[in-house]
Amino acid sequence: MSNVRHGFETKVIEVPLGRIVSDAPLGKGVLETAKYKTILGSIEELGVIEPLAVFRSPRQFGDFELLDGRLRLEALKELRRDTAPCMVSTDDECFTFNRHVTRLSAVQEHRMIRAALAKGASEKRIAEVLRMDVRSIRERAALLDGVAPEAASLLKNRQAAPKVFSVLKKMKPYRQIEAAEMMIAANKFTATYAEMILVATRSEALVDGPKSKKRDEISPEDLAKLEAEMERLRQDCQAVEDEIGETMLSLVVAKSFMARLLRNENIHGHLKRHHSDLLASLVSTMDAIAADNRVTEQE
């Protein structure tokens, strides 16, 4: 479908702090909390990692209403910064924007730490800012060492546990890519699922092939993990299948209703004259629903 509406505008922009309006009051004492101090220290040392989410104000031209990032905004003001990096939402409902925001992933965190180190920040200072120990900072800085770039690219925006990448390093590059694709297909990014893939990997696809376990040497604990993970995956697939069936039924009913409306010449003529873009998008959506329904029936 070519008429899908994006949740945010395509570019992150710098917005003057004086143009960002927030109607949400700060709670009493919130600026004294450890969370705020961590955000303040992080921005001072590393800059803004996750842009603020804003919406173009319909009340005052040039202003932006804040949807997310209240503490980041206050930290920027305290640090006397002039502007803030912002993602501009196409929807002014703050409860929906979170569906479009991808929180900081392990790969993004790795790149942030590497960038901070390249700028001269010490491991100790970064650890203090992020409230982590130095050992964790070193592990995250080396997260992608030995990981195929293609696999890292596939997982860069996924909420994969850092241990997943340790498991991937035990596989050869082509198997890492296969494993990343399997995790995406199953929507599973846990270390347990990665270990399940590792156990099922042929010895020739492992970095230490000759030292890998033989089939009859798999421990009962490994088998128990495999069985538990596969059962959870089966349940998840069943839940998705049920949800898809209900959703498709609702879409087909809605499509039939809209088709009846469009058969009315007055309604169709009005839309064509005054809302041609909306009509084209509606017809395209109905065609897509019809195509998806035919595929489902064939399956």
Image (tube, rainbow, N blue to C red):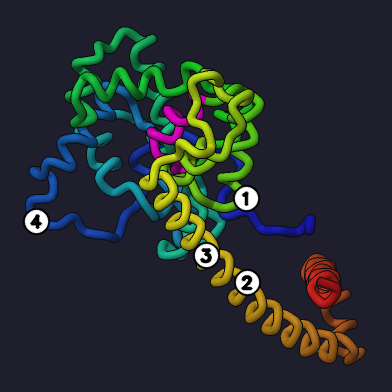
The mark found on residue 28 in the picture is 4
Looking at the image, which residue is at 48% across and 30% down? 213
Residue assigned mark 3 = 236
On whether residue 160 falls in the magenta region, the answer is yes
How many labels sit on residues? Answer: 4
Q: Tag 4: Cα neighbours inside 10 Å, few (<14), some, or many (≥20)?
A: few
Amino acid type for the residue under numbered disc 3: Asp
Q: Earlier in the sequence, mark 3 or mark 2?
A: 3
| Label 3 residue SS | helix
- Check the picture and name the quadrant holding the N terminus: bottom right
Q: Nearer the viewer, residue 37 or 54?
A: 37
Disc nearest the viewer among 2 and 4: 2
140 w.r.t. 54: above or below: above
| Label 4 residue SS | loop
Residue range of the region highlighted in magenta in the rendering: 159-170
| Label 2 residue SS | helix
Distance Cα–Cα, label 2 vs label 4: 46 Å
Asked where in the image residue 136 lies, by quadrant, the reply is top left
Residue assigned mark 1 = 185
On whether residue 217 falls in the magenta region, the answer is no
Distance Cα–Cα, label 4 vs label 1: 45 Å
Mark 2–mark 1 contact, CB under 8 Å? no
Distance Cα–Cα, label 3 vs label 1: 12 Å
Distance Cα–Cα, label 3 vs label 2: 9 Å
Amino acid type for the residue under numbered disc 2: Glu
Looking at the image, which residue is at 40% across and 52% down? 224
Residue assigned mark 2 = 241
166 w.r.t. 141: above or below: below
Mark 2–mark 4 contact, CB under 8 Å? no
